[in-house]
């Protein structure tokens, strides 16, 4: 009987330590958005970020034969940051900034997504009893991914 109880506790201990190790593993990357608002720099932690680029060769106007380029960033925050929201809401010309991803263990390469003239395209706040979430959709004039300018 004692061997069964000891075996049960040993298996439970191994299982629980694996769960807690897996939870630590999830936070190994640090993602942040940083924008420059006049003399002030605002840095906010990010849960997820998505970068999108589309190029349309169909002109809006028959006389205009230039390509349309669309650069979008979608950023998901655990909670709304009012300083960042205020910066985007009051900016007329758009904000310059960057989204960075850093592996806190130093094993994966860092990533950097720079944007120029970023403006808030849409905003979504989700409020629930267990959690909150805020999404920004940002369009910009120029996108630089890991030092490569997307044209």
Image (spheres, helix red, strand yellow):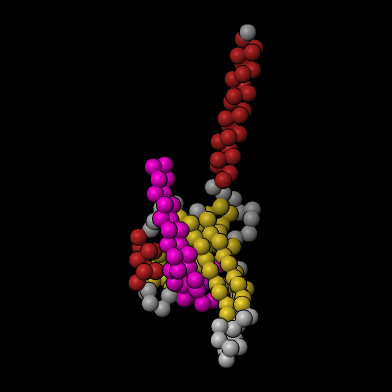
Q: Residue at x 47, y 76 (%)?
A: 117
x then y, percent, for residue 71: 55, 72
Q: Which residues are magenta?
A: 113-142
x then y, percent, for residue 21: 58, 38
Left or right position of 30 against 43: right
Whether 55 is drawn above or below 34: the answer is below
x then y, percent, for residue 61: 55, 86
Q: Residue at x 36, y 69 (%)?
A: 89
Q: Residue at x 59, y 39 (%)?
A: 22
Secondary structure predominantly adopted by residues drawn in magenta: strand
x then y, percent, for residue 57: 63, 80
Q: Quadrant of residue 24?
A: top right
Q: Is residue 79 or residue 28 the one in the foreground?
A: 79
Residue 30 is one of the magenta-drawn residues: no
In which quadrant is the N terminus drawn?
Answer: top right
Name the outermost residue toward the bottom.
63
Q: Residue at x 61, y 54 (%)?
A: 106
Instruction: Decide if residue 43 is in sight here.
Output: no
Left or right position of 36 against 58: left
Q: Is residue 34 or residue 72 the one in the foreground?
A: 72
């Amino acid at each position: 009987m004692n061997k069964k109880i000891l075996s049960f506790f040993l298996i439970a201990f191994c299982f629980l330590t694996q769960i807690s190790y897996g939870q630590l593993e999830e936070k190994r990357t640090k993602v942040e958005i940083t924008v420059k608002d006049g003399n002030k720099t605002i840095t906010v932690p990010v849960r997820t970020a998505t970068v999108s680029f589309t190029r349309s060769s169909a002109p809006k106007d028959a006389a205009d034969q230039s390509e349309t380029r669309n650069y979008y960033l979608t950023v998901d925050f655990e909670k709304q940051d009012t300083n960042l929201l205020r910066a985007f809401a009051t900016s007329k010309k758009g904000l310059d900034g960057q989204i960075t991803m850093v592996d806190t263990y130093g094993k994966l390469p860092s990533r950097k997504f720079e944007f120029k003239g970023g403006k808030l395209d849409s905003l979504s706040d989700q409020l629930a009893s267990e959690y909150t979430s805020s999404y920004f959709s940002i369009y910009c004039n120029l996108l630089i991914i890991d030092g490569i300018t997307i044209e």
